[in-house]
Amino acid sequence: MKKMPENHLQPEIYVSETGKGFKRWLLVLLLFIVTFIFTFPFEKTLVGMTEKIIRSQRACPISYDKIELSYLFPGISFKNPVITGACFQKPGSDLALDQLAVTFAGPNFSPFGVRFKILATTEESHIEAYPAIGLSGRVIRIADTKIGSDIISTLSGMDLIAGELAIDGLVEIAENQISNAKLKIESQSLKTKIANIAGFLLPPMNLGSLVLLSEMDAGGKLFIEKLTLGAPNSTLAANFKGNLTLNRYNMLYSNADLTGEIRFSDEFFEAIPLVKLLLQGKEPTDGFYKLELKGPLGQTRPNFL
């Protein structure tokens, strides 16, 4: 081995250990983050904040057994959630959900901010909404949503409609109020069940398809661009345009101003002969009768033109 003078140092001593130092600092930082995560009461804090927000929503309370936190897909879920009837102005008509969860869905670009996903399911319905909170406002995107007979019956208060509604929409919110909303509702298999209406026994009817295209302004007026119901072989078919001034507290008091046309099948005339009396002296065009609907939804009567 080659001998070196006593005052001569090895060259390796002058080699920089910057790489090793960075790794040590990275390890220290990682240990700090892990320690912080496992010692800071994230779950208790988030659950407490969520419960406080829910308690503040007195107009639409939600009951549940427990709130659980998810780390794999950051978010919260509710065990045995129930939406009370007060949310849709029907006290006592509570809606039990199979699933209710809110998860982080990543960044949002219009408006620029963060986006969340709300998932709610029942035996017959599947609801997905994506609220986004940004610097310039808030929006809620409704997609991949299907409303079944269970929710339709709860909202309407009548066990009349059978079928499924596909819903797509975009809601813009400013100052905690809806500033604009666009809504599209479609169905290909809408039917009615046996019902007693004004003393007349209404048989099950095949309504077929439904298409609703509408837009709502900040004043709560719903502008109906297109409302079509039925098919060539359905019990009845109709087309409407116009607007609804929505009553946020009771939909039946929403004021309608609609004009359109409607066709009745022989089956419908046999079930409700009173309709024929209303049509006396009215001439159909291609089987359709012109009419208008004006006044509160719960009290309006068709005026055949």
Image (cartoon, helix red, strand yellow):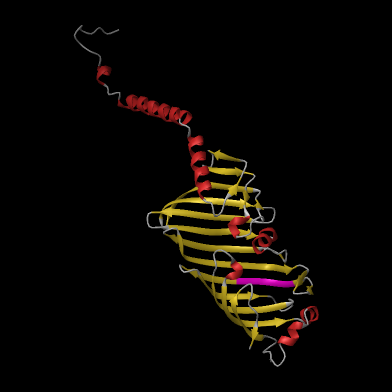
Instruction: Indicate whether 29 appears above or below 106.
Output: above
Quadrant of the rendering where the C terminus is positioned: bottom right
Q: Residue at x 68, y 85 (%)?
A: 288
Q: Which residues are magenta?
A: 206-211
Q: Is residue 215 above or below residue 101?
A: below
Q: Position of residue 137 (x, y in %)?
A: 40, 57
At a point 75% along the width and 86% down the height, the residue shown is 276
Relative to 146, 14 lies left or right: left
- Image quadrant holding the N terminus, namely top left
Say which residue appears at 56% left-offset and 54% top-offset: 60
Judging depth in this view, the residue of 290 and 295 nearest the camera is 295
Q: For residue 224, what is the image quadrant?
A: bottom right
Image position, residue 101 (x, y; %): 57, 47
Instruction: Reply yes or no: does residue 210 show up in magenta.
Output: yes
Residue 154 relative to residue 202: left or right: left
Query: Where is residue 244 shown, x and y percent of the image?
Result: 55, 73
The residue lying toward the viewer, choosing from 52 and 138, is 52
